[in-house]
Image (cartoon, rainbow, N blue to C red):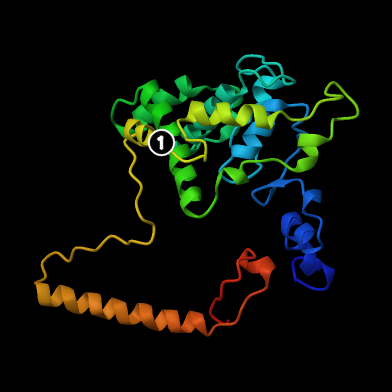
């Protein structure tokens, strides 16, 4: 029913964030930025709560798996029940994960490998010297580029949060009994460690340090037509402009797909 969008299956296909909001109970959705939680209750793993809240793709254990340190002791053991030191830990895991992903290496190899093991592989593949410091910087730059993309798409510091239940209702059993996630304590420190302002935006000095410039996503680079004179290049641009306008007309009159197929953004696509 869900796959076919039939009956209540269509409602379930909205995802828990949109479904619970539709019926007036958004706090019931255990999600961040619309992405549902994986396995971990962040009241018992403080760093994982901060990682969920600040992940660029919403609650995800594949963007900063601090469980490795807080529970498994990889590469070092940290106390999962305390907030102290977690902003630095989360940043380190997030940047390292971005570097692993950029290298095309499965993140699960990080249980055995660190960036020091990945660095010579990247250097061998790219044919130039990639120092460990450079690899770390690449991971940090990638994370900040994703953050900046989200900021330009409308995400703000208000989206760096957890479900109210995890911030106000203490755990009732287990080692974390009586604890809530201490995100309000950790988040400002995390922003400071990241080099972001209080609104979760990259500071100018952070952009300068990472040699990263923001580009207007609405501007498309102009293509250079080599070997053509100005008149030919102008004719080609006019041709592409006509095709884009024609495509826009089709999109404007296309049928609207159901929300479970269009990401709930209400955009119109061509009729099939």
Q: State which quadrant residue 90 falls in.
A: top right
Where's residue 127, x and y in %? 29, 31
Against 27, residue 198 (above or below) is above
Where's residue 121, x and y in %? 41, 27
Residue found at x 81% / y 50% = 28
In front: 184, or 223? Answer: 184
Q: State which quadrant residue 169 falls in.
A: top right
**Residue 4 as seen in the image, left or right of residue 106:** right
In front: 191, or 14? Answer: 191
According to the picture, the residue beneath numbered tag 1 turns out to be 203
Which residue sits furthest front?
Answer: 198
Against 36, residue 175 (above or below) is above
Q: Is residue 149 visible?
A: yes
**Residue 216 as seen in the image, left or right of residue 25:** left
Residue found at x 78% / y 34% = 41
Q: Secondary structure at mark 1?
A: loop
Picture quarter with the C terminus: bottom right
Where's residue 18, x and y in %? 72, 60
Residue found at x 58% / y 25% = 87
Q: How many marks?
A: 1
Picture quarter with the N terminus: bottom right
């Amino acid at each position: 029913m869900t796959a076919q969008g039939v009956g209540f299956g269509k409602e379930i296909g909205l995802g828990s964030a949109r479904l619970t909001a539709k019926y007036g109970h958004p706090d019931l959705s255990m999600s961040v930025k619309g992405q549902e939680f994986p396995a971990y209750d962040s009241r018992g793993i403080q760093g994982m709560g901060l990682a969920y809240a600040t992940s660029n793709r919403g609650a995800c254990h594949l963007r900063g798996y601090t469980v490795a340190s807080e529970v498994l002791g990889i590469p070092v053991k940290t106390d999962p029940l305390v907030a102290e030191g977690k902003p630095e830990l989360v940043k380190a895991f997030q940047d390292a994960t971005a570097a692993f992903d950029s290298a095309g290496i499965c993140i699960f190899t990080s249980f055995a490998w660190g960036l020091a093991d990945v660095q010579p592989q990247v250097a061998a593949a790219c044919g130039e010297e990639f120092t460990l410091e450079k690899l770390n910087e690449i991971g940090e730059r990638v994370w900040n580029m994703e953050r900046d993309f989200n900021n330009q798409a409308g995400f703000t510091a208000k989206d760096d949060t957890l479900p109210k239940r995890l911030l106000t209702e203490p755990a009732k059993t287990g080692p974390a009994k009586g604890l809530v996630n201490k995100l309000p304590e950790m988040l400002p420190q995390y922003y400071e460690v990241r080099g972001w302002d209080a609104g979760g935006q990259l500071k100018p000095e952070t952009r300068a340090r990472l040699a990263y410039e923001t580009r207007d996503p609405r501007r498309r680079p102009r293509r250079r037509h080599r070997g053509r004179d100005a008149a030919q290049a102008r004719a080609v641009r006019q041709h592409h402009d006509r095709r884009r306008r024609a495509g826009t007309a089709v999109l404007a009159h296309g049928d609207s797909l159901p929300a479970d197929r269009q990401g709930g953004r209400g955009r119109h696509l061509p009729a099939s």
